[in-house]
Image: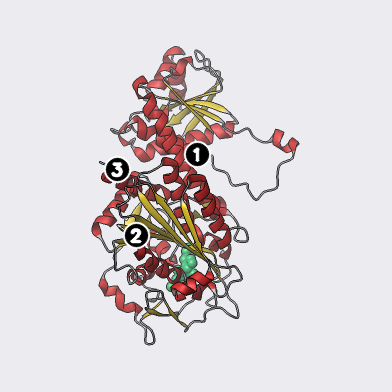
Amino acid sequence: MEFNIKTAHAEKQHGHCVIVGVYESHQLSNAAQAIDDASNGYITNILKRGDLDGKLEATLMLHNVPGSQAERVLLVGLGKPADFTEKQFCKAVRASVKAVAASGTTEAVSFLAELPVKELSVRWKVAHLVEVVLDATYRFDAIKRKKTATEEKEAKKELKQLTISIADANALNEAESAVAEGRALAAGVSLAKDLGNLPPNVCTPTYLAEQALALGKTYGLKIEILETDALKELGMGSFLGVTQGSEEPPKFIVMQHLKGHKDQKPVVLVGKGVTFDTGGISLKPGAEMDEMKYDMCGAASVLGTFKTIAEMKLPLNVIGIIPTCENMPDGRATRPGDVLTSMSGLTIEVLNTDAEGRLILCDALTYAERFEPSAVVDVATLTGACVIALGHHASGLFSNNDDLAKELLNAGEAALDRAWLMPMWDDYQPLLDSNFADIANIGGRAGGSITAACFLSRFAKKYEWAHLDIAGTAWKSGKEKGGTGRPVPLLTAFLVARANKLNA
Ligand code: BES
Ligand code: MN
Ligand code: ZN
């Protein structure tokens, strides 16, 4: 998609399509008003007839509007002016893109970034407009057969060029850099979606390792891939216990984005990379088991965030750690009742082989200690219980540090990629007691996402740590099945805020 920035007059636009906003109760945005004035009240008349009520996300495509040189004018409902904040802005942009796409228009000029949204800057509006447009036009057809020339010709035309008009000519530079910012975020989100959407026979641990190496090559990042022998040497008995039922070799990926001061302690991101979770010997039921290809979305979000911050050249030290493997049933697989010795030395009684995420993450958390991190954030599709608790809107957040939790909550708010703080009181810890080992890997059905976090907390005592359970937010089920790219926006906002603070 090509984006251009200019200061334009809505009524003077030639070309395919002009996008303008209309509030509820027939209140016109400036751009809609300009077209209305030039057309002797054509838009006002249409609104009076009731063809568009101005409700948020409603759209109406008009053709050959008198007084306008453009082929089409798209009216987009904005809702009530007083309610028009960040979320509504993004929803209106998304609705406009869907309507433009449905019409087969290839070029458009959008005046939505001229709308006042609270006190938000041109930069915020343009960056979010770009990100939402790229998110809304995302397609995953990597696995479909290639279209024939005839099919290609008959296929619906796609939006290729979007001009964004801004009101203030002095803000052109700011808007241009906002386009780059929006693109960088969208690139990371899109990578995370792609990796999630790829089938599990393609997106294997080896494939994820190759993606990390490719990122390293493109952006000059140091990438290490630790193989089985090295993992044995390190004593990662917990991670290896999960991998041993699979024919696919495990990989332990370490990525280094060191663009901050050399004495600055890094932020470490850890992502769960189970490329397929059958449950192991504690086999999952068959229904919807295909969705367990998404059990590597934590890893995908770490890779996506690395792409974004590398594109942005974010001046911060960030380490990414991805333990990746499959969880399969097999003659060699870990049995319920087996005891594994983790890298930390703690022994773990595996009461359920389907609670594998925490078993691979705990060794990664121990490995993270060597970087003397300023903070560690792990991201994992960890528990079905988190989906029951929070549904699909918020990721579950757990932390051993209130300030870090606040930073992440704020980042989620700002990025419209929210998390919700869950309790992790000591009261829950005894649920993990084992008669035979130092700790059990499950704590029973009640508070399942909390006991999972409590398990991880045992391995994160040496630094400030937070855990994001993204089981409900990383992908959508049903007709629109697909990766969402979350929480790349949250993680990016968190890192950008940290970089801003350090470089202030
Ligand atoms: N990958 C799953 C968590 C999951 C389940 C995410 C459903 C999204 C949808 C994880 O490895 C798992 O199986 N967790 C178990 C834990 C239980 C055995 C304590 C779960 O949530 O059922
Ligand atoms: Mn599992
Ligand atoms: Zn899992």
Q: Nearer the viewer, mark 1 or mark 3?
A: 3
Residue under label 3: 500
Q: Is residue 432 visible?
A: yes
**Spatial CA span between label 1 and label 2:** 30 Å
Tag 2 secondary structure? strand
Residue 204 percent coordinates (x, y):
58, 61
User: 184 or 145: which is nearer to us?
Assistant: 184
Q: Is residue 56 above or below residue 285?
A: above
User: 307 or 470: which is nearer to us?
Assistant: 307
| Amino acid marked by disc 2 | Val
| Mark positioned earlier in the residue sequence (1 or 2) | 1
Residue 66 percent coordinates (x, y):
51, 14
Tag 3 secondary structure? helix
Classed neighbour count for the residue bearing mark 1: other residues with Cα under 10 Å, few (<14), some (14–19), many (≥20): many
The residue most toward the front is 262
Query: Which mark, residue 309?
Result: none
Q: Does residue 249 appear left or right of residue 31 in this picture?
A: right
User: 417 or 65: which is nearer to us?
Assistant: 417
Residue under label 2: 376
**Tags 1 and 2 in contact by the CB under 8 Å rule?**
no
Query: Which mark, residue 134?
Result: 1
Q: Is residue 26 visible?
A: no
Q: Is residue 433 above or below residue 167?
A: below
Residue 459 percent coordinates (x, y):
34, 70
| Mark positioned earlier in the residue sequence (2 or 3) | 2
